[in-house]
Amino acid sequence: MEQKICVISLGCSKNLVESEHIIYAAQKLGYTLTGDINNADIAIINTCGFISDATSESIQYIINTGRLKENGKLKYLLVTGCMVERYRDELLHEMPEIDAIVSSSNPEDIIRAIESIGDSKRLCCIKDNINIEEYPRILSTPSYMAYIKISEGCNNNCSFCTIPAIKGKYRSRTIENIVKEVRHLSRRGVKEIILVAQDTSRYGIDIYHRYAITDLLEALGEIDGIKWIRLMYCYPEAITDKLIETIKDQPKVCHYLDMPIQHCSNRILKSMHRDSSKNNLISIINRLRENIPDIVLRTTLMVGYPGESDREFNELLDFINEMEFDNVGTFAYSREEGTEAFDLPDQIKQQIKIQRKQKVMITQRDISYSRNQNRINNVYEVLIEKKISNGKYMGRYFGQAPEVDGIFYVNSKVNLTPGQFVKAITRRAYVYDLEGEYYEEDGTS
């Protein structure tokens, strides 16, 4: 009798790539896939354990899914991912819903663990060596886009971060390996590739002994069928003039950069073990905008880091107003065991962290809206993603990454299809989104 597997992916896009490998392994080993957890015999939850909020979400998913073993058809619940690497013993002893705890290092090991589960036996199969080389996967994203994980692990050792302990040292895939995967995806109709890693800007440092992200971008730019190449998680400390030049000159590379800076206070940056200073950040941002005037900059900020004074927080607000990022993701500092920052004095009260996060978001709303207003009457190439109603579609232009940024609404009398690139002229701007009209090549709309 066929057994149906449902894979639930939590957390970031890097986790999603791992889940897609697991989905392929399940199909390869003879299982039937289902997206309906209520119709599954086996559930695999790929967890996130980066910060306490993500851990809480993962635990809640485990509890809710475990209930289906009592009142549904679900037989087995397997758990993998970051939270397993961090809390394997606690999960084994405190969550009886779980039938198996397995590492995400080898997708086929995860599936084969199903066969080792007995009626009264709980399995803990942990692999310490993570194979980041190409393993086939089944895309869970729309057919026209794919995330490409170019490396695993991280060497930055930020004082607040658990990733190095969970994922290990930085390990790059080879350019040849990545190019092979993207060529395969291009033949299947993928048009946008989104490069992800814990730190994309340091790609290649371990195997080529230099920053090789520009070499990778140039190699990917030669692949027929690929229209957009998007760079995420690019640390400012490793943004070189050569990378800026490549983004500017390589036609397939989006004029978009996701650049997490965390803070601007020199004292806080030093305590975080970030290799930046406020002046360096300003210099990098200015160089990016001077060389690529239409570049869209996204960043991530952290508020409530231990010892963050009112003066330092106000310094951050001033910096946001001065730099005018297009989009900002904001996190309240999460005190994580095993990190250096966990033991720092002057931990900030949760209420203050929440208030500071809200102030950042309010400040950024006005900036994002103003920058979007400046895009009115501009013509952009838009990737159509969905038909909303007759004559109305939603998509993204180069300045919008999926999931984290806004939407470009396109009004069109011409029938459009998902995965199609069209020209649209911007007519209205909102805080995060844009709205425009289908734009004919002759200049009519």
Image: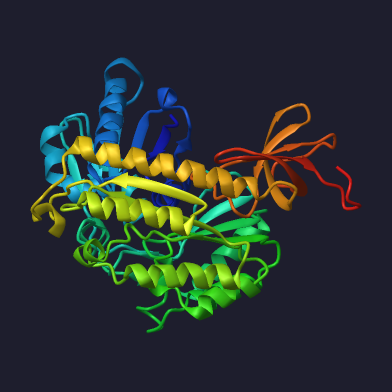
Say which quadrant the C terminus sits in: top right
Residue closest to the far top: 71
Q: Is residue 8 left or right of residue 137?
A: left
Residue 83 image position (x, y, % from top left): 24, 46
- Report the residue at 40% width, 41% height from top: 361
Going 39% across and 50% down the picture, which residue do you hit?
A: 15
Position of residue 335 relative to residue 213, above or below, is above
| Image quadrant where residue 351 sits | top left
339 shown above or below 213: above
Q: Is residue 219 above or below residue 28?
A: below
Residue 60 pos. (x, y %): 27, 29
Q: Is residue 350 visible?
A: yes
Question: Residue 301, how many percent across, how many down?
Answer: 35, 52
Q: Is residue 136 left or right of residue 172?
A: right
- Place of residue 138 in the rendered image (x, y in percent of width and height, measured from the top left): 52, 48
Residue 384 occupies quadrant: top right
Q: How many marks?
A: 0
Task: In this rendered view, identify the residue nearer to me: 167 or 359.
Answer: 359
Specify the farthest residue to the bottom.
209
